[in-house]
Image (cartoon, rainbow, N blue to C red):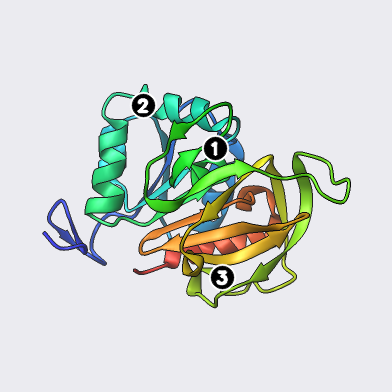
Amino acid sequence: MNRHQVFGLEKGKRKMTVVIVDYGSGNLRSAQKAFERVSGKNGRKICVSNEAREVLRASHIVLPGVGAFADCKRGIDALPGMRDALQESVIEREVPFLGICVGMQLMASIGHENGLHEGFNWINGEVVAIKPKKKLKIPHMGWNDITVAKKHLLLDGLGTGSHLYFVHSFHMQCLIDSEVIATVDYGETIAAVVHKKNMVGTQFHPEKSQAIGLRFISNFLGYKY
C-alpha cells in the first residue's frame, strides 16, 4: 500500500474526514468550531473522537493540547489503541497531521516538563522550559509576531509579522533546523511552526488566532504531501 492509498481508496477519492482527537485535554470546542468554519467551504466532515478506529479512517488528524506534557501523553496512552492508531496513520500511511501547542510538543523525542518523559519521537528534538529573559513573564501568553524561516505552502497567506495567539511555558528545540519553518521571539528564538513530511505542529493556537489562524487551518486542510 502506498501513501496515497487508505482503506483501498486512492488519494482524491477517499472520504474527507478531519478527526480532532479527544483525550481529555485541549480546547476541543474552539478547535472544532474553527475547523467547521473552514471546512464548510469544501465539505469536509469534522469529527471529535476518542476512538482509535476513527483516527484510522481519517483523512486529516488534529491533536490539540492544553496542560502539561506528561499529562497529555498519559491521556493519549489511556485510550485503547490510540497510540498505535496514530503511529500507523501518521508515520506508516503518512496521513496529514496537525499538532497544536502541547499536541505539537508531543511530536518531539523527549519532554522535560515535571521530569523526563518520552514523546512520540516523530521529530528529533526536546521540549524544554522557556528561559525568562528581559523580565518577560512566563507563560508566554497573548499575541506575538512570527518570523518565517522557510517558505512553505502551509504558510501561504502568512508571513513575517503575522500576529498569532500563544499560551505556553515550554517549547520545542528541534535538532534539525530545516524542520522549523517559522519562529517567534520571546526572549529567545522559539519554534512557532515545525514541519516534517506530512506532519506540522504549531506552538500558537490557530483556532484562537482569528482570520490568520483560519487561513493556516485552510492551508493544512488543502495540503497535499
Q: Amino acid at mark 3?
A: Leu
State the separation of the CA atoms marked 2 and 1. Answer: 14 Å
Q: Is residue 67 left or right of residue 105?
A: right
Mark 2 surroundings: few (<14), some (14-19) or many (≥20) residues within 10 A: some
Nearer to us in this view, 66 or 118: 118
Looking at the image, is 99 positioned above or below residue 3?
Answer: above
Q: Amino acid at mark 2?
A: Asp
Numbered badge on residue 77: 2
Q: Is residue 221 left or right of residue 143?
A: left
Looking at the image, is 79 positioned above or below residue 225?
Answer: above
Location of residue 20 in the rendering, given as x and y in whole percent from the top left corner: 44, 41
Residue at left 50%, top 46%? 126
Residue at left 60%, top 51%? 203
Q: Is residue 41 visible?
A: no
Quarter of the rendering containing residue 86? top left
Nearer to us in this view, 115 or 191: 115
Q: Is residue 37 left or right of residue 7?
A: right
Q: Earlier in the sequence, mark 2 or mark 1?
A: 1
Location of residue 224 in the rendering, given as x and y in whole percent from the top left corner: 36, 69
Determine the secondary structure under disc 2. Answer: helix
Residue at left 48%, top 70%? 178
Instruction: List the residue tagged with mark 3.
Output: 155
Location of residue 225 in the rendering, given as x and y in whole percent from the top left corner: 34, 68
State the separation of the CA atoms marked 1 and 3. Answer: 21 Å
Residue at left 21%, top 62%? 3
